[in-house]
Image: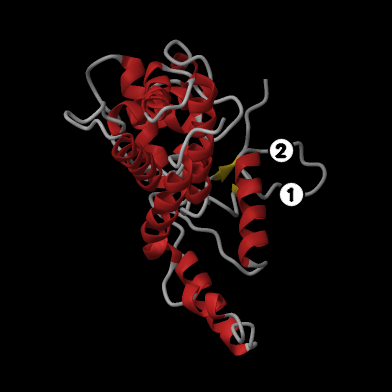
Amino acid sequence: MGVAVLTGRCVECDADLPGGSGRGRPRRYCSRRCQARAYRRRRDHGPTATPRRDHGPPGTSRRVPDLPAPSGGDPRDRLVGLAVELADSGGLDAVSMRVLGQRAAMPVHTLYRHVRNRGDLLAAMAERITAARMPGDAPGCDDPRQQLERLARDEWTMYRRHPWLLVVLATDRPPTGPAVLAMVDRFVAAFTSAGYDAAEAFRSYLVLSGYIQGMALLIRRDPTDTTYPAWWSATRVRLERTGRTQRRPWLVAAGQSSPDTALDTWFQFGLRRLLDGLLSGPAR
C-alpha cells in the first residue's frame, strides 16, 4: 500500500496537500470545499482577492479558530455545542465532520456514533439555538400583536446572532425538532387568538416568516469577512462618482448608513407595517 506524499500547500487555506498520481495538472486545493470557496471569493471580490487564512504552526493552518473541545456531559450534546461555536466563528463552511473531529479530539468515524450525518448535525444545531432563543409566551401578554412582535423580534435576533441558522431553517425541508415546531406553534396560536382559523393562521405565519427570513438574507453570513466594509464603502463612492445617485433620492438615503448598522431599523419598519395588514382582519 502506497503512502501519500505531501506535495505543497493549499492556496486557499494553506493546509498541506496530499500527494497525487503525478499525472495531470498540479493540485492547488486540499478539498472541494476550498475550491468552491476560492471560486466564490473571485466571483464576489474579483480575481485579485486574496484568501483569508489563520496563520499558525506549520501544518495546522485552518480557516476556523482553534476552539477548545468541550468536556463532560453527553457526547452528542458536546458535539452539537462545538459545532455551533464553529459555525458562529466561521459560518457553515467551517463545520465539517473532519474539522469537528479534530476540535473534539475524536476520530471522525466515532462521530457517527452520536450524529447520523452532517444533516442530522445541522438539525441538532438549529434545535439547540431555537430552544435557547425562542422563549415561551410572556406572562400577562394576551394581545396578539404584542405576541407576534415579540416572537418576530426573537426570531430576528436568532439570525442576527447566528447568521448560518437561516440556511438551515429557510428551506422546503426544515428540521422538525420539538423546539422548531414549538416556535411555529406560538406564531400560529397568536394568529388564532386574533380570529384566524387554523389554516389561515398557518398561512399568516408563512407570510410573516417569509418577511423575517427575507430580511435575514441581508445579514452577512461570514462574520469574519473583513472585505465587506471595504466593498460597501467603495460601492457607495462609485455610485456617487458615476452619477447613479442622481435623481435617486432613495439611493442617496440608503448610502448614508451601512446595512450592517441599519438592518434592525429596516426590519422594525417593515414588521410594523406587515402586522398592520395581517391583523386588519382575517380574510373571508
Q: Nearer the viewer, residue 61 or 246?
A: 246
Q: Is residue 141 above or below residue 258?
A: above
Residue at (47, 41) in percent of width and height: 278
Q: Residues within 10 Å of mark 2 (few under 14, many from 20)?
A: some
Q: Is residue 159 above or below residue 227?
A: above
> x%, y% of residue 29?
64, 47
> x%, y% of residue 186?
36, 26
Q: Is residue 130 above or below residue 26?
A: above
Res. 179 in view:
yes
- Residue named by callout 1: 26
Residue at (46, 58) in percent of width and height: 225
Circle 1/circle 2 CB separation < 8 Å = yes
Q: Is 11 left or right of 225, judged from the image as shown? A: right
Q: Identify the mark nearer the N-term, 1 or 2.
A: 2
Kind of residue at disc 1? Pro
Q: Which mark is residue 103?
A: none
Q: Nearer the viewer, residue 133 or 66?
A: 133
Q: Residue 65 is drawn in which quadrant?
A: top left
Q: Residues within 10 Å of mark 1 (few under 14, many from 20)?
A: few
Q: Is residue 139 above or below residue 54?
A: above
> x%, y% of residue 158?
36, 40
Q: Quadrant of the C terminus?
A: top right
CA gap, disc 1 to disc 2?
8 Å
Q: Residue 11 is drawn in which quadrant?
A: bottom right
Q: Which mark is residue 20?
A: 2
> x%, y% of residue 38?
63, 53
Residue at (54, 80) in percent of width and height: 249
Q: Is 208 left or right of 66, judged from the image as shown? A: right
Kind of residue at disc 2? Gly
- Count numbered badges in the picture: 2
